[in-house]
Amino acid sequence: MKAFRSAVIGCGNISRRHTEALTGSALAELVAVCDIREDRAAAAGEKYGVSYYTDYRDVLAREDIDCIHICTPHWLHAPIAIAAFAAGKHVFTEKPMATTPEDAEAMIRAAEAAGKYLGVCFQNRYKFINAKLRELVLSGIYGKPIGGKGIVTWFRDVPYYADSGWRGSFETEGGGVLINQSIHTLDLLIWTLGDPTGIRANCGIFSELLEGKIEVEDTATAHLRFDSGATALFFASNAWKSNSPIEFEIQCENALLIATDDALTIHHADKRVERIMDTTPKTDDKSYWGNCHSFIIEDFYASIAEGRPFAVDGHEGIRALRVIDGIYKASGFGPRA
Ligand SMILES: NC(=O)c1ccc[n+]([C@@H]2O[C@H](COP(=O)([O-])OP(=O)(O)OC[C@H]3O[C@@H](n4cnc5c(N)ncnc54)[C@H](O)[C@@H]3O)[C@@H](O)[C@H]2O)c1
């Protein structure tokens, strides 16, 4: 028997990344799945040969389950996590950890009160190219970082929102392109440069097709200022024509580092160009999501097993939420506008 017994709550699109990571894990095994849609719960239960449930409280009542993975719509992350901590479980939640910083703080308090681990799925921190870029920047070999850039231009149409039952509304999604699609890239920027202390921003529904169909932003742009003097430019939109590769760049005093899907390109001040390739095998066609779920999930369980802090805990997960809240406030658009 493996060290941890786990359940996945929510059997939609992303759940497969969790069930497959658990199937391949040396430390944790999948023992239950749950979805309010019985067809989805049953299909996942049959596929993996595990029990299935339609009410997550029945999963939490099982004493033999150590950890739950939350793969539900955003507004349910906080209440399910808090109930899971009360039931004595560890929690690994999909991003965003909650729809508001206040809910995220309540999750952190509940985890600490229960003495359980809370992990947040920012799997792109485990992508080789992103981690290498950060390691090189923080090493200082290129001088101080003076700027950052994050660009996410993807395509999401009306059915993507309308058919989901939860996307497109502030109450259930918490926001739009910022809190859902581009939160990973925002997280990479602040993971590398620190938390911004000044934010100027503009958000809105820029696509004519989405106007009147969603209440959340399809496009956001922000200029972030850091105490170090560095600044970052951020642009995210779901109103592009395709899912373009993400751009993540850091300008240091003596080099520009550009991370793309499979390569890190370093433009040195003396005009030399160096390229470091990512040779990690790709798992499927949705490589724009990043394919590192199995890496972060295994590290989560290894952290618990070894009694060491988990690298992407609630205190790390809340950072991007606070910046998103700041972007909404600066733009005058958002759930509290
Ligand atoms: N890490 C990533 O790169 C990544 C990529 C895609 C999605 N996500 C995140 O994963 C989460 C789910 O997204 P998705 O695209 O899979 O959504 P989805 O709508 O495809 O799946 C959500 C599932 O949760 C179920 N559900 C709703 N209420 C429930 C409840 N009370 N109990 C149990 N199940 C319930 C729904 O029936 C649905 O099957 C979101 O937080 C999303 O942001 C993360």
Image (cartoon, helix red, strand yellow):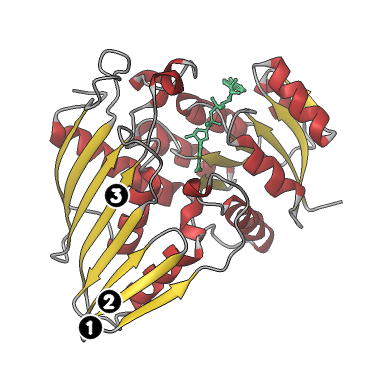
Residue drawn 20% across and 82% down?
269
Rendering coords of residue 114 (x, y %): 58, 41
The quarter holding residue 171 reads: top left
The quarter holding residue 255 reads: bottom left
Q: Is residue 95 left or right of residue 236?
A: right
Q: Is residue 318 above or below residue 49?
A: below
Q: CA distance from mark 1 to mark 2?
A: 6 Å
Give the residue at the far top of this rendering.
Answer: 212
Q: Amino acid at mark 1?
A: Lys
Which secondary structure, mark 2?
A: strand
Residue drawn 52% across and 39% down?
94
Residue named by callout 1: 271
Which secondary structure, mark 1?
A: loop
User: Mark 1 and 2 residues: CB-CB less than 8 Å, in contact?
Assistant: yes
Q: Amino acid at mark 3?
A: Ile
Residue named by callout 3: 151
Mark identifier at residue 267: 2
Q: Quadrant of ligand 1?
A: top right
Q: Earlier in the sequence, mark 2 or mark 3?
A: 3
